[in-house]
Image (spheres, rainbow, N blue to C red):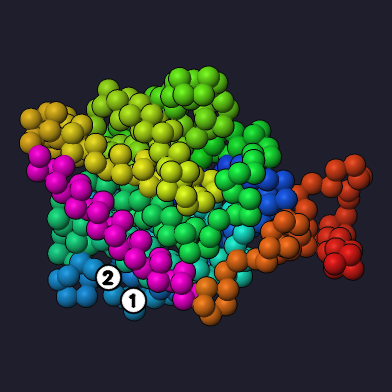
Amino acid sequence: MELNTGNTAWLLTSAALVLLMIPGLAFFYGGMVRMKSVLNMLMMVMGALFIVGVLWVLYGYSMAFGASYGSTGLLGNITEFAGLGQLQGAEPVEGYGYPPLAFVAFQAMFACLTVGLIAGAVADRMKFSAWLVFAAIWATLVYFPVAHWVFNLNSETGGWIFKYGVIDFAGGTAVHINAGVAGLALCIVLGKRIGWPKSPMRPHNLTLVMIGAALLWFGWFGFNAGSSTAADDFAAQAFINTFAATCAAAIGWLITEKIRDGHATSLGAASGVVAGLVAITPACASVSPMGALGLGLVAGVLCALAVGLKYVFKFDDSLDVVGVHLVGGLVGTLLIGFLATDASPTGINGLFYGGGLDQLGKQAVGAGAVLGYSLVVTLIIAFILKLIMGIRVTEEQEITGIDVAEHAETGYELGESGGGGVFAGMGHAASHSEEG
């Protein structure tokens, strides 16, 4: 197969766009926490990038995209591509013409981002060391296998969810439902923040939240349109649908806020953007642009309402990972069963286009399987880590601030001239140590 430079350029560009989403997510989450927790949140998201990036090279890609053991479609061969040495200089992928390592890079960013999404559920109170251990174990036991189920598209050796006929173009199940329910499990095991829900825990920097949401939206075009792995009709439709659904979701969220609370907020706008991006992710190549508008509007309204569930069920999901990612992922995955049209590149009709309930049933099976597996395994991982090493900072550290407790730094040196680099930071850390 001859190298297709256009497809290769688009795939590598998309990989870089998805990588940009990770600091975008860090800023989005970082702005929503209190000032004493912003650095820890940035470090949790970036720490997941570091850990999962190493594991992806060692064995993660092989577990996700190696040939299934037997015909189960449950797990890829962990040794087939271990270390990635076998893919150096390999022939371009048949039918697409990009080097295999370009696809490895693209999917690596998905893995790193998915783990980082979970961090928002446990803001302010989880030990950084415990988070890194959790990230490594969760990626290995949950994300890599689920990515195999959904993203390994080989008709013979690929994942069972794909072969079952579930439509998930860019990760509504493997990324958002997976991370959303994992965040729920982890925050339940970890427990509530001190003072929640009675004490106000407002975002400390809404400007940072809006910047993060903008970077996420920009990078998401690589996430969704890049999942075509080619510069083609799939990519074009995924691009415009991603744009349309996100705009509609932001409007839906703001209208819901205005009716419920009397105000349309910047935090609501940023959250609506992310909710729309989440919901359109699985559906971006299977619905029409009008369908994308409808899907986005529904997602914006439902996610805006869903963020209140934590007060009803008393789980402290700090930054609404459940309300946005779990609920948004479910909305987008299930609405495919209603809104899919054979005029789109996927070529399948949902209920509203005469396709009956068959596709909706498949979507529900795929969503339910990922939700159940991730929930159970995450609970087990979290409980074991809690027993072995402890996963929560002390009460005093939480009150003082997790930035100082875990990183010996503060996000803002207000009223000081600042300056200096690494050595100045060491002096700053030492001063806190002496004060302690």
**In the rendering, at what x and y percent does residue 332 appear?**
30, 39
- Dominant SS type (magenta): helix
Q: Is residue 223 visible?
A: no
Quarter-wise, where is residue 206 in the image?
Answer: top right
**Spot occupied by residue 65 in the image (x, y as percentages of width and height):** 31, 65
Q: Is residue 62 left or right of residue 424?
A: left
Q: 226 or 382, which lies in front?
A: 382
Where is mark 1, residue-wise? 78
Element type at mark 2: loop
Pick the front one: 195 or 301: 195
Say whether marks 1 and 2 touch (CB < 8 Å): yes
Label 2: how many Cα within 10 Å (few below 14, some 14–19, many 20+): many
Please tell me whether residue 123 is drawn above or below residue 282 in the rendered image: below
- Give me the disc on residue 75: 2
Q: Is residue 338 left or right of residue 293?
A: left
Give, as a single range, the part of the protein colored magenta: 357-385
Q: State whether residue 431 is above or below residue 264.
A: below
